[in-house]
Amino acid sequence: MNPTATESSLTKLERLTEAVRLAKSGQFIDAYDCLRGCGSFRDWNGSQRADIAWIVSELGAPRLSRWHTLKGYREAPESLNWPNLV
């Protein structure tokens, strides 16, 4: 992903939306780069963790993915985004 001047002004949620769009097209490394500018992956919360879990699992971090899945489910069990892993 090529950084642009407007990319730095994106909010955390906008970056997540962009990362999910990239991941859906198979560009997981670009999705990771997009999210990396938001700080630690552990700083996300609630149902946003489902998308983070999916992206990091595809990049080969199963333990971090499971951590996000379980912690996110505990924070927002009513969310419909959770996979059948819980």
Image (spheres, rainbow, N blue to C red):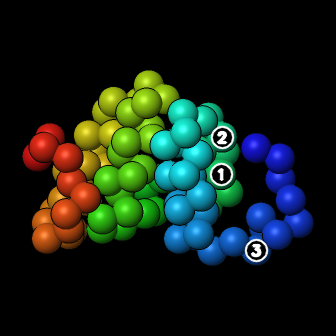
Residue at 59%, 69% in the rendered image: 14
Secondary structure type for disc 2: helix
Whole-number angstrom distance, CA of label 1 to CA of label 3:
12 Å
Residue at 86%, 59% in the rendered image: 4
Question: Which dot marks residue 30?
Answer: 2
Q: Amino acid at mark 3?
A: Ser
Whole-number angstrom distance, CA of label 2 to CA of label 3:
18 Å
Residue at 66%, 40% in the rendered image: 30
Secondary structure type for disc 1: helix
**Residue 84: % across, % down:** 13, 43
User: Do labels 2 and 1 touch, CB within 8 Å?
Assistant: yes
Residue bearing the label numbered 1: 34
**Residue 51: % across, % down:** 39, 52
How many marks do you count on the picture? Answer: 3
**Residue 16: % across, % down:** 53, 61
For the residue pair 65 and 31, the one nearer the viewer reads as 31
Secondary structure type for disc 3: helix
Quarter of the image where one finds residue 45: bottom left
Q: Amino acid at mark 2?
A: Asp
**Whether residue 29 is situated above or below residue 86 in the rendered picture:** above
Q: Is residue 39 left or right of residue 48?
A: right
Q: Amino acid at mark 1?
A: Cys
User: Do labels 1 and 3 touch, CB within 8 Å?
Assistant: no
Residue bearing the label numbered 3: 9
Question: Crowding near pointer 3: few (<14 within 10 Å), some, many (20+)?
Answer: few
Between disc 1 and disc 3, whose residue precedes? 3
